[in-house]
Image (spheres, rainbow, N blue to C red):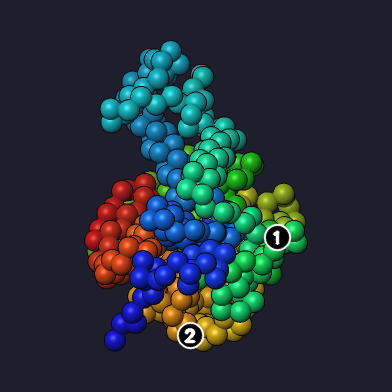
Amino acid sequence: MARESVCYCNKSKSDLEKFDYDLIVLGGGSGGLSAAKEAADLGAKVAIFDCCANAGDFPKKIMHQAALFGEAIQESTDKLGGQYIGFLKRKPISFDGKITDSRFSGWQIEADIQHNWRSLENVVQKYVKTVKCALKAELARRKIVHFPTSGSFKDPHTILPAKSGHKEVTGKLILIALEAREQYPDIPGDVQLGITTEDLFSREKSPGKTLIIGAGCMGLECAGFLNGLGYNVTVMNRSAMALKRLDRSMASHVVAEMEQRGVKFLSECQAKSITKSPDSERLQCTWVDGENQQVAEDFDTVLFAIGRKTSLTNLNLEKASVRDFNADSGHIQTMNEQTNVPHIFAVGDVLHDKPQMASIALQAGKLLSRRLFACSREHMDYEIFGFVLFTPLEYGAV
């Protein structure tokens, strides 16, 4: 049976004045930001901790569009040759009704067509800065207090800031909305020499020949745009199937499409170590294949896309009397986002057995605040939701 959510609009003013804030959000994930903004719009006094102003999927989408742009240029150039290159140098091009300057995507069109990774990375970072500035202004406009540090529980209603210089604060309601971080596989050289997908979007150096370990959605999307930008890409997967959560026929079609475009797949392979190559400045990855044979190959970049996990270690959930959580998996069990403590909630990546998708967390956070501060009865449907994949084949499903 579902727990009944605490409703702010039914509480007296004197009851709420016992606390510094009506709602304190721990973590700046999509769900936490959405909940904070919705609560503030409904008249609540809100504070948010450790809001990192993440630009979400947009850096990935910028690179995806750059890859599509390059493919369109290449296809047209193959048909029209040097005449088309001369046209590109004189004016921007229109693709799908949108005027796009090739320089925006990092493409350099001189005697031939080349891609400049640094130019594209600069575009991505400028966008991230724009998002951070816009979010800062948005929080200020809604009078949401931002603590640029993480927080932990002192007791069920009191939050201790991690950084000195900030005093402890109290909240009538607490929302845990930590973002999951990309994981490393715990093999020799992984952290020292490898990168995650989060690092890729701020990497100044061209990735070059790239090995992507992990064949889930993020791994294949990165493989797709890197291949489209002209880099040699190999995807390694522990199992025989990529995209295990997708429909099998569609997953096979996506992989076949990527192989046709030049992406190499290594199935049933287990990475064992990463070292610096003795013969070059490259990285040497060693793995065991499906026939239990040890294989080694050199790459410029080894990228891990093996999944994400939240860390609950520093929250001190025990001091808040929250019981139903797993520190190893980084998940909290809830019922309609409510923990066993009636005034403490969780949303987004920290939820047990729920999809880790920004769009889902965003809607869940908004609906939660409406239940808490507008007495709504609408709950998030975690069973039916939209899903998109860009590899660069664009696939959507419900």
Q: Which residue is mark 1?
A: 166
Rendered position, 264 above or below 124 = below
Left or right relative to 262: residue 108: right
Q: Quadrant of the C terminus?
A: bottom left
Q: Residues within 10 Å of mark 2 (few under 14, many from 20)?
A: some
Residue topped by disc 2: 324
**Residue at 57% across / 49% down in the picture?**
200
For marks 1 and 2, the one nearer the N-term is 1
Tag in front: 1 or 2: 1
Residue type indicated by callout 2 = Asp
Could you tell me residue 116's position as x and y percent? 56, 32
Q: Residue at 40% of width from left, 38% of height from top?
A: 65
Question: Left or right: where does residue 214 sit relative to residue 10?
Answer: right
State the image quarter where residue 298 is shown: bottom right
Q: Residue at x 63, y 63 (%)?
A: 150
User: Compared with residue 123, is residue 301 higher up or lower down, i.e. above or below?
Assistant: below
Is 397 drawn above or below residue 372 in the view shown? above
Q: Which x, y percent locates residue 310?
A: 54, 70
| Cα distance in 3D space between marks 1 and 2 | 29 Å
Quarter holding residue 246: bottom left
- Is residue 308 visible to us here? no
